[in-house]
Amino acid sequence: MKYLFLSLLLAGTMVSVQAQTKSPDDYLGYKLGSHFTPHQKVVDYFKYVASVHKNIKLISYGKSNEGKELLVAVVSSENNMGRLEEIRKNNLLMSKAGKRNFELAKQPVVLWLSYNVHGNEASSTETSMKTLYTLAEGTAPNVKQWLSNTVVVIDPCLNPDGRDRYVNFFNSVVGSVPNADPEAREHMEPWPRGRSNHYYFDLNRDWAWQTQVETQQRLALYQDWMPEVHVDFHEQSYNEPYYFAPAAEPVHQDINSWQREFQVIAGKNNAKYFDQNGWQYFTKERFDLLYPSYGDTYPLYNGAIGMTYEQGGINAGLAVLTVDKDTLTLKDRIAHHFTTSMATLESVSTHKERLLTEFAAYFERSVASPPGNYQTYVVKADNLPRLKKLAGLLAKNQIEFSFGGTQQLSGFNFETRKAGNFKLERNDLVLNLHQPKAVLASVLFEPSTVVTDSNTYDITAWALPYAYGLTAYALKEPIKGSYADLAEATVARKVVRDPYAWAFSWNSMEDAQVLMALQRSGIKVRVAEEAFTSEGQSYKPGTLLVYRRENEKIFPQAGARIEAIADQFGVQLRYVMSGFVDKGRDFGSSAYTLLTVPKVGIVSGPETASLAVGEVWAFFDQELKYPVSMIGVQNLGDLDLNKINVLVLPDGNYPKDLHEKLDDWVDNGGKLILMEGAIAAFADKKPFEIKKKEDVVKVDKKKLHTYKDREKDDFDDAIPGAIYKVNLDKAHPMSWGLDHYYMLMTEDKIYEPLTEGWNVGMLKPGGYVAGLAGKNVQRKLENGLLLGVQPIGKGSVVYLGSDVLFRLFWESGKQLFTNAVFLMN
């Protein structure tokens, strides 16, 4: 295959007698495309090139979960590199709509190239070394001119843990000659595969939410530069040709005409070189611009041009025979990604002035005239810990906000979905959209996203008030808060000696930290299953109680330890002086349950969905800091109740006889938590009562389909992530701490109500709130069970019909899941 564009670019390098830098081939000791390069060797090569070139600056921005170095190389002309900090600050000034004190004509444009966010899409990291070498040498045609106009930031690998997982697998199974047979072992990557990071998270869905350490560190650097153009390099099925922008519909309404136009400009320039080489490609299909947490949409909502490039190649190894009977090699894949890398640099350099002008205007417009129907969002402080987490997310994204006031206001109520009056109070969060990050803020908060096409690539609803379970209002007028910070309640108390019991509230996940600390100290903790009043003080269901007498029998210094834990977490500790209460049940009642210390197991392995396992694993390990055991399905028949008394089955495709392995364990006192697809293995199997609800409503199937639309989803049956309000049984422990709950539904599965258990979360008519849900789906989801608990013998089964831990940004779902683990014996 003749690579015309590559030959032109490298011609200068081949004839130059002055080039002293080792090429990737020379440095690595093998030709690019003949092996997969481990991450450390890639890092070493980047450091080597930077050590011999003045026009390169390396920035190490952190470590992956497994301790691998994360870095970028900044490359430009020597003149630009000499004033790099000035250029960066000028760029930031534009992104903050500041008054420019520099000439735009003398400012280069910033192009950021991100390679290998999905670890097993492995050709792009190989490409990054070729790109760095070509730019560093500067001897290829036009490269010096392009770099005089452009600062290029190259991130060789966003996901080194996942990439090395794939590379180590492949290098361990490939022979001396690659086997191109698609059925060969080297093309059959084992679970959990290399796509995700250490905790099995898809980092390309994490840009806005920043739940993962790699994303958090990368976004901190990204926010320090705010590039004008960002390209995210991916791979897709090896039977697909190359994809580059312009993107498919739906395109979010807040993506402006220039951002759309430049996608076409870049796409046509890429196409020019692909046409010269006779390479196949497609545009305007499959990859849309809606969901705000991608590597293309997040930059778009931050004023840049964001684009995704997709090379066919997942699991292609070094060579694979495609469905068209053509052999696709790693060398081919590198050539394609390299060509779009350089062609995009050419497009960016050529359109430098327009890119900078539009970039500056983007933020000026944001401050003067925010997009959307609303100008202010107010989030009520009805759950302070979750409000703090929301504020933390906004701060990570550099979205401005304030707190509090005394006004009487009116706005769209997210809960009722109608206009309503409310009073602005001291700790309410106020988000005024007249700010540089107006577009991103508007997209994250908009009550309902306009979706123009059902053929979406991801979820279609994500409004943060629903995700965080907080009361919120959208206002059509600009309002500013009166305070920069929350008014933190001071935790002051007069220590009481020898109370009957100590009481802690249960309103948030942070209260679970208190419970865990108490139990780690060997302190027995009870929970009030009903409200009660003692000495004029009201206590809600879920109140944690520590009885002095039963603890001092085994722990004489229990009081001092309890006081220390309250101080450690800064929580309010109340003293209850008598077991005789004013209202409710006295403390000797069975309504005050002694909580069992959870010993948690998580099922993982080929039967499970790795991303679902990752959500549960990361939640315990990273957020709760709570020990768990990862257990394979093959070992479930030998569970020891003394070692594992809570077992979580994430979404997956489990053996139909799995229930037989767990019957006795549950009957003897185990708690089984079934999430999403795990329910199917237990449905209609005695003694498990759960049963999928049959579709008894008439759905419209008379629509005639045309051959033209054969690849599109049926809009009437589509539900690519829509928000539904769940009707909660608020008396049940799983609901404590939640005033309301919204579920992100990605399937139309729903279950029959339990007759021998507790129907904790039901969908009722009118439950649909936002996102794309076709009329047939809405009919199916009008009545049925989503969240339930069934007692079986001494144990119980928790049914979670949808993903309550969705990508770990669905904060209110974390509360529900925490309740299920810690509060329900």
Image: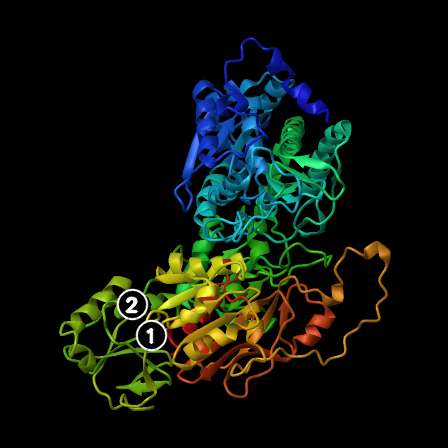
Is label 2 in a helix, a strand or a loop? loop
Instruction: Identify the amino acid type marked 2.
Output: Val
Mark 1 in CB contact with mark 2 (< 8 angstroms): yes
Between the residue at mark 1 and the residue at mark 2, the CA separation in whole angstroms equals 9 Å
Which quarter of the figure is the N terminus placed in? top right
Is label 1 in a helix, a strand or a loop? loop
Question: Which image quadrant for residue 651?
Answer: bottom right
Q: Which residue is mark 1?
A: 505
Q: How many marks?
A: 2
Q: Which residue is mark 2?
A: 571
Decide if residue 740 is in sight here.
no
Image position, residue 684 (x, y; %): 59, 80
Q: Residue at x 63, y 56 (%)?
A: 458
Decide if residue 30 is in sight here.
yes
Instruction: Identify the amino acid type marked 1.
Output: Ser
Question: Which image quadrant for residue 477?
Answer: bottom right
Q: Which mark is residue 277?
A: none
**Front-most of 222 and 130?**
130
